[in-house]
Structures are given as structure tokens and as C-alpha cells.
């Protein structure tokens, strides 16, 4: 059996429950979580997020790449069309033992340069082997980008795969606030 069939079976078992939920386009916690695509850091499990509570964005490393900046810009326009008040919160979650850390060697610098769209010489400033440094670097990228509303509140969190503990590295603050 393909995994798709397994998952469709699981969905069928949930249809009754899901169809009774009335969820709005606005996430209940008015939050977005940017996290690694890693299967061990699913925010529904490690942060206890329930269905409808937060928008989840994922990529290798949970990084603020140019693609993520575009995603956030699109979501900001949707929020504007929906007439949502500003003050959404974005939680950037990086984690220990990240697969992206396996690309820390010079042989992968060109690929990471394309991923982050920076010159290869700037790849070390992305700190792919250090989640504490990388989450700080990504918050700086958000602050520096004019496409992202200044009213967005952003925080940086590191999740430790071994201990199961998440810790705040960059406290929540509006992007427009002085760092
Ligand atoms: Zn990861």
C-alpha cells in the first residue's frame, strides 16, 4: 500500500470530527510558525498546536530565505484583504541536529548560496551548524526586509531534539522595534 492510501484512510476516520469544526481563515492564535521541515519538529507535536491555531511554514532548516520572505509578503496581503488587525506573531523555530547542518562544508557552499540567494562568501553568516546563531541571523534578515510589515511581532526559538525543550533565543518584539 502506498503511504497516500494509508493517509487517506486516516483522513476518512476523521471526517466526522473535522466537518464539525468551524475554523476561520484567521488562525486562532494569530500566529505563524516558521519551522524546519524535519519530521521530528512538527509544531503540532512539539509546541502542542491544535488545528486552526497557527499558520505553519516549513523548509529545510526553518530558514528565512527569499522564498519565505515572498510567502510572508503574500500572507500579509491576504491578511490586509481580510481586514485583519496588525499584530500577528511569527515564531521562527530552529533545532539541534538539523539536516541543514550536514551542509556546513565548503563543498555545499554554492548550493546554500543559491538557497539563501547570497554570495558564497556570505554563507558562513547563515550559521547552518548552530541553531542559536542561525535563529538570531534570521531575525535580523526579517528586520532588514522592507517587504515585511513592521507591525509583525517576531521571535526566535531553538528546539532541542534530545531534551524536547524549546527555549526563546530572541524574545517576541515588533519588527519595527529597535533590536
Ligand atoms: Zn532541521
Image (cartoon, rainbow, N blue to C red):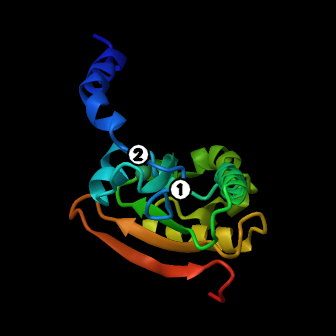
Q: Position of residue 49 (x, y in %)?
A: 34, 56
Q: Which quadrant of the structure image shows residue 72?
A: bottom right
Q: Does the numbered disc 1 mark a residue whose Cβ is under 8 Å from ligand 1?
A: no
Q: Which quadrant of the structure image shows residue 139?
A: bottom right
Looking at the image, which residue is at 66% across and 50% down? Answer: 71
75 in relation to 157, above or below? above
Q: Position of residue 108 (x, y in %)?
A: 59, 45
Q: Residues within 10 Å of mark 1 (few under 14, many from 20)?
A: some
Q: Position of residue 179 (x, y in %)?
A: 62, 87
Closer to the camera in the image, 161 or 29: 29
Closer to the camera in the image, 164 or 73: 73
**How many discs mark residues in the rendered view?**
2
10 in relation to 161, above or below? above
The outermost residue toward the left is: 163
Which residue corresponds to mark 2?
A: 22
Left or right: where 134 falls relative to 69: left
Left or right: where 138 falls relative to 129: right
9 in relation to 143, above or below? above
Looking at the image, which residue is at 65% across and 53% down? Answer: 75
Kindly indicate whether the residue at mark 1 contacts the one at mark 2 (C-beta within 8 angstroms).
no
Which residue corresponds to mark 1?
A: 26
The outermost residue toward the right is: 146
The outermost residue toward the top is: 1
User: For the residue labelled by badge 1, is the local secondary structure a helix, a strand or a loop?
Assistant: loop
User: For the residue labelled by badge 2, is the local secondary structure a helix, a strand or a loop?
Assistant: loop
Left or right: where 18 falls relative to 135: left
Badge nearest the viewer, 2 or 1: 2
Closer to the camera in the image, 150 or 124: 150
Q: Which quadrant of the structure image shows residue 84?
A: bottom right
Q: Position of residue 52 (x, y in %)?
A: 41, 51
Classify the position of the N terminus by image quarter.
Answer: top left
Amino acid at each position: 500500500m502506498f503511504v497516500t492510501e494509508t493517509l487517506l484512510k486516516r483522513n476518512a476516520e476523521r471526517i466526522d470530527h473535522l466537518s464539525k469544526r468551524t475554523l476561520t481563515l484567521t488562525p486562532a492564535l494569530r500566529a505563524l510558525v516558521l519551522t524546519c521541515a524535519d519530521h521530528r519538529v512538527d509544531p503540532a507535536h512539539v509546541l502542542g498546536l491544535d488545528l486552526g491555531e497557527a499558520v505553519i511554514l516549513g523548509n529545510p532548516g526553518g530558514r528565512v530565505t527569499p522564498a519565505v520572505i515572498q510567502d510572508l509578503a503574500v500572507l500579509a496581503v491576504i491578511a490586509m484583504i481580510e481586514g485583519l488587525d496588525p499584530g500577528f506573531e511569527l515564531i521562527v523555530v530552529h533545532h539541534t541536529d538539523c539536516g541543514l547542518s550536514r551542509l556546513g562544508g565548503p563543498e555545499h557552499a554554492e548550493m546554500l548560496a543559491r538557497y539563501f540567494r547570497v554570495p558564497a562568501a556570505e554563507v558562513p553568516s547563515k550559521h547552518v551548524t548552530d541553531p542559536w546563531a542561525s535563529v538570531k541571523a534570521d531575525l535580523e534578515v526579517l528586520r532588514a526586509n522592507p517587504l515585511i510589515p513592521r507591525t509583525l511581532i517576531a521571535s526566535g526559538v531553538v528546539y532541542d531534539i534530545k531534551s524536547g525543550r524549546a527555549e526563546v533565543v530572541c524574545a517576541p518584539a515588533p519588527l519595527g522595534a529597535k533590536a
